Amino acid sequence: MRLGSGAFAASCVAIEVIGVAIFIRGFFPAPVRSSARPEHDAETPAPEPVAGVRSNWTKLPPPLFSKVVIVLIDALRDDFVFGSKGVKYMPYTTYLVEKGASHSFVAEAKPPTVTMPRIKALMTGSLPGFVDVIRNLNSPVLLEDNVLRQAKAAGKRIIFYGDETWVKLFPKHFVEYDGTTSFFVSDYIEVDKNVTRHLDKVLKRGDWDVLILHYLGLDHIGHISGPNSPLIGHKLSEMDSVLMKIHTSLLSKDRETLLPSLLVLCGDHGMSETGSHGASSTEEVSTPLLLISSAFERKPGDIRHPKHVQQTDLAATLAIGLGLPIPKDSVGSLLFPVIEGKPMREQLRFLHLNTLQLSKLLQENVPSYEKDPGFEQFKMAEKLHGNWVKLHLEENHSDILLGLGTKVLRHYLGALKTLSLSLSTQVAQYDMYSMAVGTLIVLEVLALFLLSTPHVLCRKAELDVPLLSPVFSLLFYLVFLVLSAIHVLVCTSSESSCYLCSLSWLAVGAVMLLVSALFCAILSALIRMVIDSTLLKKNAADASSGWSEVNLLLLLGTVGHVLSLGASSFVEEEHQTWYFLINTLCLALSQETCRSYFLGDECEPQRHSHVEQQCVNLLACPLQDSTSYNTPESGTAGKRVSLLEAQGSCKWWTVLASPWLVLLCCRLLRSLNQTGVQGAHRPDFSHWLTSSDHKVQLSGLAALSLVVIFMLVQRRCSLVSKVALALGLLGVFCYRAAIGIVQFPWQSDNKGISKGIIEARFVYVFVLGILFTGTKDLLKAQVIATDFKTKTVGLWEMHSGLVLLAALLLRPHNLPVLAFSLLIQTVMTKFIWKPLRHDAAEITVMHYWFGQAFFYFQGNSNNIATIDISAGFVGLDTYMEVPATFLTVFGTYVGPVLWASHLVYFLSSEGNNSALSRSCFCYALICSVPVATYIVLVTSLRYHLFIWSVFSPKLLYEGMHLLITAAICAVFTATNQTRHRRA
């Protein structure tokens, strides 16, 4: 099978995406689970332990509270309640914390700190898998045992108002509910009013047992303007009023009932200093947990400081408080202050039920559970508990009984802590089989890439892929049979569940066929490489050995970046690696321009030789393209043209100054957004711009950036597209002014603020119009033999449409990033790549480097919290999953996408038939190497201390980047097909 190198690369990346998806499915495993399924009949509660006699307490203890109200405020940080903001904006809550009948805690939320996994942790007491950060966008039904399932089984009536994630997780648990869309972050007013409007009616009624309220407004404000926004204070005051209304109502009801009620105030996760969440910073994992009830008597002068607990502890506490069994998968501990006022026998009974449940979970998940310190401590506590009960039943009320009870209590609390910690560290069991298959596919694709590189670049960008060759048919079937046998063996002998084992035989067979075909292709490429190297050995001595500094830098920099991914600090601060590489690249280009101008071409290596020499060079250096993207004139063939000959209309000083201008731009951009972990807290220019005191400066900078963007983009657009681009950029500023982030000179501050739906859709019209115009020109060039200019104009207009969309989605303080990106592209094109005649491989790697650097320039990192999900809701009045996901991904990866788009235009405009195809291959290769290497690294580091906080988020980023690369390679291939059809 003969394929162009572009089509070959696109196919390989698509296969690699499948491999990475299988690996991720196995790498992000399911947490520890109980073997008893929740749908089974409820087990009989374990009796009270007694030494030598039979206990008369064999049932669950009665409930402690008649009603429970849970007020969950999304993204509520602990310092919003216990800090200065709480004192200022939540006076009633502060009074309850300091002097009221309450117990306050700081509950630690484990990463990922996004809503759906945190709700699961609160209700099940288990630790959700990290992959739940992906499921957060479309929450499936919760099948695990949980407090709400137990409450419904006990006949309790549950009412819910708020985030519709609860309705998706618990679709049949509520007798009454009203869900609100959680992802429409532009709304922070109506989304909470839709919850509060039900309060007066439901609080007057007594026909419910559990009321859950989930408020989203605070989280939305954080996403829009961060934790220091003035809107935060208003929202906290609103929540304080809601809490006061609920508490006052519950107190009045308590006088009419035998049992008191319980009011729970909590947050699902915190909020980072940028207003986002998802990672493991202190601000994101620290949430307040406030338990308020008239049962918690407080003496004057009793000062209770917030204690640090785990978020998973709430499930066990709610279950005990409602008289329900503790969820089977819970790893949490009962919050002891809740039962501290009860008689000793009840306290010991509650603690015994909790430790017994944890010990059973430990037995089912840890083979050597008997040696666990927590289990040994539990057995000792249970034995002492039996002795205490025996004395109690004998009506012995001496000091010995009291002392023994205190000792048992201490043992139970110690066992709870140790067991909970043991189960929390035993978070998961990796699906090693799925990981191995995914890794095998990815490594096979990488091997095929590396082995095919010299042949793709030597033989007119085409490659023979011998998948159907009869020579390998026997080997192919043999490999397929061996893999099938291994699959059967693994699936029949594995004690734990494997993802691939749960698939149908048709799907598994397709995977095995794919692995077998790749193996045969690799073997064929190896044989061909041996043959070619034998034929070319005699020419090796004559091959050019000259490597420029830029070639060496591109190769060593790429390899160095890949190797750096094995260190957690380098992953956290990866932006520093890219900043260093592009700065060094600018210095190398400066040296090259100076040498080319002052020394001419005397010191340049010979770059163009006969075909045999090219192939030998490429076998040694995969990244060095043997054919330049443009063909030099016959008089200068064999040498790179000197700067004086190539500069044309360019002034010599502009060429010499251009690398330094690029370096200056990059340095300015580094000061705009602090990212990473070590420096994220440091003040930067973006924080200064986004403060409410500097709205005028932000407005001026945004307007200037939009003007610069128009001037740089409109040069190659048609007249219609120029008008559309100008109106679209004007609409971008109008949209930001409508939502109150920037303002016109004549506009009053915070007057007429709206959601900007009309203005954003106005811009979308022009984006689609420009993209349609560009697509029409490309199709015209493909179907009709038009002039070459039609295609290049079409490609530039598609690039312009993407630029306009990026301007709409990026926040105003990031518009200079877009402007500088376009400026650097213009400078590099006119003064570096064309005068110095860099080949396609070099230009491709440089585009990739700059794309990665601009990913971090806009404030991104390998931390999930830096994803700006507000970009996914620009112009949407309701939540629509597909558009919101697309816009969020594009807004996050603006840098790589725009630089790849410019690469397609630049190489297509130079008129070489094979440069674009070779560039696609190089781009796919340079994206595949880090992914394959990182998969091997995270497999070996899967028990690393920072595997979930550092390496796992990076794996998700790499997977998404590879998916985007597959789309980019498809565009490369489609564009190159246009050329072939026209030719």
Image (cartoon, rainbow, N blue to C red):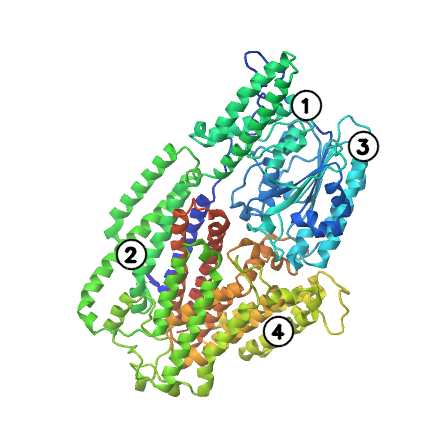
Q: Residue furthest front?
A: 399
Instruction: Name the kind of residue labelled 2 in the image.
Output: Pro
Q: Are marks 4 and 2 in contact (CB under 8 Å)?
A: no
Any mark on residue 706, and which?
4
Q: Which residue is mark 2?
A: 466
Percent from the top left, x then y, of residue 72? 68, 43
Decide: is 161 above or below 811. Answer: above
Q: CA distance from mark 4 to mark 2?
A: 51 Å
Work out whether residue 11 or residue 346 is closer to the camera in this orientation and state it.
346
Q: Which residue is mark 1?
A: 343
Percent from the top left, x then y, of residue 469? 27, 54
Q: Is residue 171 visible?
A: yes
Q: Which residue is mark 3?
A: 253
Q: CA distance from mark 1 to mark 4?
A: 70 Å
User: Which numbered mark, 3 or 1, is in the foreground of this view?
Assistant: 1
* Residue at 70% in and 29% down: 156
